[in-house]
Image (spheres, rainbow, N blue to C red):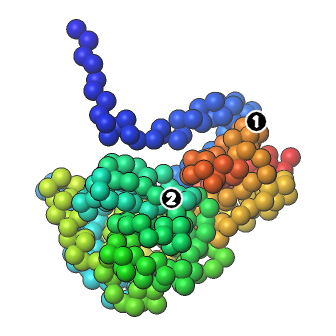
Amino acid sequence: MRIELIRTPVARNLPDFPWDSLAAATAVARAHPGGVVDLSVGTPVDPVAPQIRDALAAAAGAGGYPPTEGTAELREAAAAALARRYRVIGADPSAILPVIGTKEAIAWLPTMLGLGPDHTVVVPELAYPTYEVGAKLAGARMLRADGTAQVGPMPFHLVFINSPANPHGKILGIDHLRKMVDWTRSRGAILVADECYLGLAWDSEALSILDPDVSDGDHTGLIAVHSLSKTSNLAGYRAGFLAGDPALLDEVRQVRRHAGMMMPGPVQAAMTVALADDAQEAAQRERYRARRAVLYPALEQAGFTIDESGGGLYLWATRGEDGRATVDALAKRGVLVAPGDFYGPRGARHVRISLTATDERIAAAAERITA
């Protein structure tokens, strides 16, 4: 007897997984005699700092259930890191919530905050695909818009912003951030800022929505999303946290407790060390800065225009053609990149090129692109 799998309305409502469409280009790039240079995803390739690995190992013997809200040490380390690194003064450790990677947090936030079919989620016009996934999982309506004028008088309930942004690296200035805070509060909406690349600003300063110059020290209605995946190479650890409005985060905490969404204890210990150690974060930042300095001029030399890209781990590039044609052309040179249409219709003539490859692979990509 064959059992038929039931495809739920939720699964049917989700978009196709973007990277599945790169199978043909991936095969072409892998066939290159020098091997593939995969710049299509933002997966860290550098080693985790020894002191972080040691903390993970030292905590491996503790077999009890970890606290959903995080250990006191972790929450205090996160609050202190926000103050040192990003000028978020007065962050309440009780309003810090560890999450099992920020992708799952973003995907489930609309649901955990009680949104549903009667609510609207606003996402950037060019955006990390998981914002859309989060709206769809909650069954909420979704609107792509970058500013207040595009939304107009229609009601909305949660707004995602991202600075420095994935895919295009734009950094939102203080005036824009303040306007977003004031606008969402005036409409009784929640503002969620994905700040996973906040420590990777290149051309100008990047500010948190929790910065007193942005929020006036009031975190009501605000949630900042932070990740150690890129800045400390902890993507495999699934180490991230939320900070901001204590009432909103307590609501999320309670849902997560019931759902058993607990960051493993050893990861909490490793994350605590990573948040307290600015030297390893600075060293990783410099690795990415050096790789950017190699790849950026090579693309320009090859006739690409690089738009935005003032922060983050990607270069947003175009040759004035359909992005899929650019993907195919680079694949023939053994370089795999992501088409801009992954991130919304406005990205159709761009490609996103990641800096997350070894120095040797970045140098190889630059050589192939300019050949």
Query: Looking at the rendering, which quadrant does residue 25 occupy?
Result: top right
Task: Specify the quadrant of the image occupied by residue 113.
Answer: bottom left
Which of the pair 367/220 is nearer the observer? 220
* Within-10-Å neighbours for mark 2: few <14, some 14–19, many 20+: some
Q: Is residue 250 above or below residue 208?
A: above
Circle 1/circle 2 CB separation < 8 Å: no
In the image, what residue type sits under mark 1? Answer: Lys
Residue 291 in the image, given as x and y percentages of width and height: 68, 62
Residue tagged 2: 144
Disc sitting over residue 332 in the figure: 1
The residues bearing labels 1 and 2 have C-alpha atoms spaced at a distance of: 34 Å
User: Residue, x 63% and y 79% (percent of image)?
Assistant: 204
User: Which quadrant is the N terminus positioned in?
Assistant: top left
Which residue lies at the image location 57% right of the left edge and 35% below the top edge? 21
Q: Three-letter amino acid code at disc 2?
A: Arg
Q: Horizontal placement of 365 versus 228: left or right?
A: right
